[in-house]
Image (tube, coloured by chain):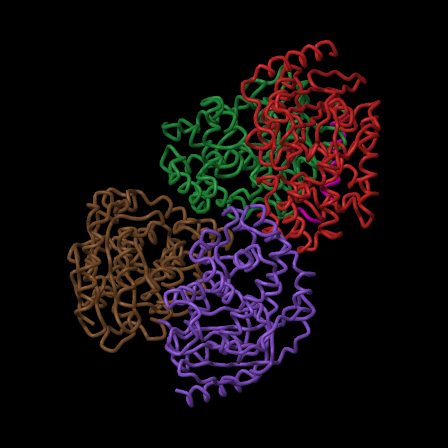
Chain colours: A red, B green, C brown, D purple
């Protein structure tokens, strides 16, 4: 498989670099707005221990909402299934930052991958500790998953998120008003913004995703039953209101971030990370999604 | 696998028959309301050609919304991807019969498995033909899939659905007003009610689901690419606003019906039909869902 | 007052006839679509028994939703305050034909002047009688109010409404499904379409509105307490989601119709009817609203 | 009128003091929660210069949302009709603190009397000045209206509102994220909480409302055209999602506050203040609303 895989990645990278339209980088904070548009990375960590890449796979990027996968795994590890009393696991049918559903459903976010649900998840991880401790535990989780200690939080990004995070502040204050935050909104939000500001390369992200593969030799950070469930939530909720479309086109559980990264899992076989900072209309990486679709199709990867 | 599978089905059937709570049968039409509650069937058609069952697997039941899987496959076969201009493929986050989303999104149903989307799908199949012809084609599709001609529409059920189908009539009239029905609402609705009134046994339903398995020797009614996509829509949208929960607990693409039937697919391996007429609060079969979860867990069946 | 009033009406009529933009006639049925655009009528029936007019005050037009005022008065007369268990009296904040609120509030329309609430009101008037009888009673009410028997229903309009009334059919079926229609949807709808198809001239409409003036010598069709309440509902709900704007600009209780008519009441003083078939973006008569605003301002008419 | 009025107030006060159910005081901040329940005040300032009262008319209470009337008058005086580009004037059909409509309508609150709209109004008054200055101007406005300088802000209430104001913080942050706050959310919110913490007696409130009467001899703080429009907004939007009911039952423009106060205007005749701290299910004063209804009915006061 390895040679074929390298060939596929090289081909897909080469094809997509010809694209006329690379989408638009996120502009809500200067740190993301100034990322050069024409970058593309694909990295695959396989169940047999290889790491195959193409393109800018050694360039760090802000993983943003992809961090929600790690945070959810960590929160479930800490709190078990009682987390599900604070957040649902149904697709929301709404945009990532919608507050409408919160009001109708009295402060219980639909799932842990929309912003409101991720804020609750971070609040669970925080659990009364100083943010520094909670973030240290999360970083340790991610570094262990990736087998690489050179993974950091970009403070400038975290600071900038906070300065422009009024919509998230609306969500956190609303959650608090509904009794679904345990820590003060500012503290949970500050932690959340730091979590989103984790930076990785595509290589590191592919490696960090291996714990979700469910194959021997992969890092065992959660039980097999739980990793399947994490994948289920990724498939149904991982791309906000384009989750159905990603499942339809790619057929793999995945999670995207506004920094242009996407992590997808081929159960039993591989962890796939793509990155291209230009976004499509849904706020997911334009060429990243395209790369994921082409790689999956040519490798015949699909959960179905 | 076969012996182990038979053992699992027998065990699960025996265990669940001890249940204190069998849920409640649907009561909106007398034909469903009078179905005896304490019935349970499990049937599995495997990729290697076996049919394994437990319980009341030879009892006919009304497949209701499970018919939407066959109708969608048929509509895509007739019309191709242009069907997706009339109906989306995103989870709705709403109840099966919600009309709210239709108004906000101007008559384009979120997906083909909520009632509004299924009515549009049926309208596409109808395509100007007399309902009798469209229904004949649908029955032929189902019979071919099952390899069994003894599958029929229950006219009494269809008639009763019509007499009590005012909420569906609201949906159809709304769709028509939005320009998203090609046939008169009464005609499309009449066809839809007949489609929902198809009756099968669990055995027949498991056999009819084989075309979605993606394995050699299975009936080839749609291309492999398309059957994967059908499964993706089943996984993200197949259980209305409990789709995320079914994916989380069972981990298989599935479609439920208010008659108490559920069809789920284990890609490459099996088509699983369960039936028990008592429903849970979400309108899905109570013991059927439980049976599906237990069988999947013990057989280690999951797409993840 | 009379001379001054005649002068004002003549002036306003003359000014508005210079308008470059007369709005657009309703096009959803041919009978309304073909009404010539450049028509304008103003008619005022005063508490001292005069009838002052300007423009096309003898031309018949379809009163459409203005009929909801008469229907509500009649329904309250027949059923008393128990009508309010079936329909609210709060502004809806939504378009006239919205179905969203119905679903969220389980089939109780917000008020009797949005379509859903008007259908319930008509259903109450119907009360098990043949539609012909109910419509006869309504016509008698209107004719008595106007003191003029030459007021009729336009059958062609009623028939055409039915042929294009799928959105109203959605509302009626939804109401029925929620248990808030007592008669079959088709019967209530048929009656509703006939009610909306009543035709009057602006003169007749101004006269028919006198029973709401609350002054001696006016037709006494409802108690003073009730006519005040009718006016309250007109002020808060009479112009759908532009009710606040009409109250703000005109300051009088009023009810508009898609045929271009508006009836407004100056408590203790006058009943004002305007008509111009071109509508603004909110579906209210463009020049009619403008005429109402100018006449009220110059006559210093306001409830505030 | 005066003798009759005194008699009515005395009677209504006496009758209502027999009530078995006084409602429940607001509990979201301790300062309101500890207000003794069994208090009732009625005060009427008439166009002929009298001030008639009954009950606890010299007891100070927190006017809370009644302050929105004064803030709106002041904001319109400062900014004119361009305020209406930032906030609508339609009834919302929603609860006072709903955020749903804000998301659907992109940060433009429906009207200045729901919380979101009042925050925008306060933000307009603030206009870049230090909060102290804006609050001083507002206090001056209220004192001038009342002809009484002994009107103050209760700092303890303002501080407590801030400590428990997460839902309002959600609204303010959402508005800011939509570009509809000119000042930092914390600054506008702080000003808003102080505005709501103004305290008055029923006597002072009745006097402060005289500028809305539109009669000679009343304080002329806004033009007649504008005070009519203020009354229109009070009538259609003054009681949140019970505005229609207040118009229906009382027939006067009014504005309620969660402290149990209500201000209503009888155009040309009187300004009526009632206060009783127990609230009904809608969050309006239970006995206050009842008192308003009885006084209006017996005095034959209604705008209709």
Is residue C222 located in the magenta-colored stretch of the structure? no
Can residue B58 be seen here? The reply is no
Q: x, y percentage for residue D243?
A: 47, 65
Q: Nearer the viewer, residue B2 or C9?
A: C9
Q: x, y percentage for residue A273?
A: 70, 24
What kind of secondary structure does the magenta stretch mostly adopt?
Answer: helix
Is residue B10 located in the magenta-colored stretch of the structure? yes
Lateral position of residue D281 relative to residue A215, left or right: left
Relative to B221, residue C176 above or below: below
Q: Nearer the viewer, residue A224 or B1?
A: A224
Figure disc tally: 0
Q: Nearer the viewer, residue D291 or B137?
A: D291
Q: Quadrant of the C terminus of chain A?
A: top right
Lateral position of residue D296 relative to residue D203, left or right: left
Q: Quadrant of the N terminus of chain A?
A: top right
Relative to D204, residue A120 above or below: above
Lateral position of residue B22 relative to residue C9, left or right: right
Q: x, y percentage for residue C299?
A: 26, 67
Relative to A157, residue B46 above or below: above
Lateral position of residue D94 relative to residue B263, left or right: left
First to last magenta residue range: B4-22
Which quadrant of the structure image shows residue B10?
Answer: top right
Which quadrant of the structure image shows residue D41?
Answer: bottom right
Can residue D46 be seen here? The reply is yes
Q: x, y percentage for residue A15?
A: 60, 13
Which quadrant of the structure image shows residue A111?
Answer: top right
Relative to D260, residue B231 above or below: above
């Amino acid at each position: 498989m390895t040679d074929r895989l390298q060939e596929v990645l090289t081909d897909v990278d080469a094809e997509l670099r010809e694209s006329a339209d690379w989408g638009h980088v996120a502009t809500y904070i200067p740190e993301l707005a100034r990322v050069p548009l024409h970058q593309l990375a694909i990295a695959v960590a396989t169940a047999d221990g290889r790491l195959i890449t193409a393109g800018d796979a050694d360039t760090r990027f802000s993983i943003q909402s992809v961090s929600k996968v790690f945070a959810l795994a960590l929160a479930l590890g800490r709190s078990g299934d009682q987390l599900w009393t604070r957040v649902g696991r149904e697709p929301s049918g709404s945009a990532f930052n919608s507050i409408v559903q919160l009001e109708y459903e009295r402060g219980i976010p639909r799932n842990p991958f929309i912003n409101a649900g991720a804020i609750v998840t971070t609040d669970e991880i925080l659990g009364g500790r100083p943010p520094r401790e909670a973030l240290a535990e999360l970083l340790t989780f991610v570094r262990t998953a990736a087998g690489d200690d050179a993974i950091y939080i970009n403070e400038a990004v975290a600071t900038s998120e906070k300065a422009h995070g009024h919509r998230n502040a609306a969500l956190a204050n609303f959650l608090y008003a509904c009794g679904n935050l345990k820590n003060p909104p500012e503290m949970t939000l500050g932690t959340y913004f730091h979590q989103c500001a984790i930076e990785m390369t595509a290589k590191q992200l592919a490696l960090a995703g291996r714990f979700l593969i469910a194959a021997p030799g992969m890092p065992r950070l959660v039980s097999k039953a739980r990793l399947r469930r994490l994948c289920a939530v990724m498939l149904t909720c991982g791309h906000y209101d384009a989750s159905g479309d990603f499942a339809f086109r790619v057929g793999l559980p995945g999670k995207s971030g506004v920094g242009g990264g996407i992590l997808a899992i081929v159960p039993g076989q591989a962890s796939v990370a793509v990155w291209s900072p230009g976004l499509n209309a849904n706020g997911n990486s334009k060429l990243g999604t395209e790369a994921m679709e082409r790689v999956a199709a040519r490798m015949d990867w699909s959960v179905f």
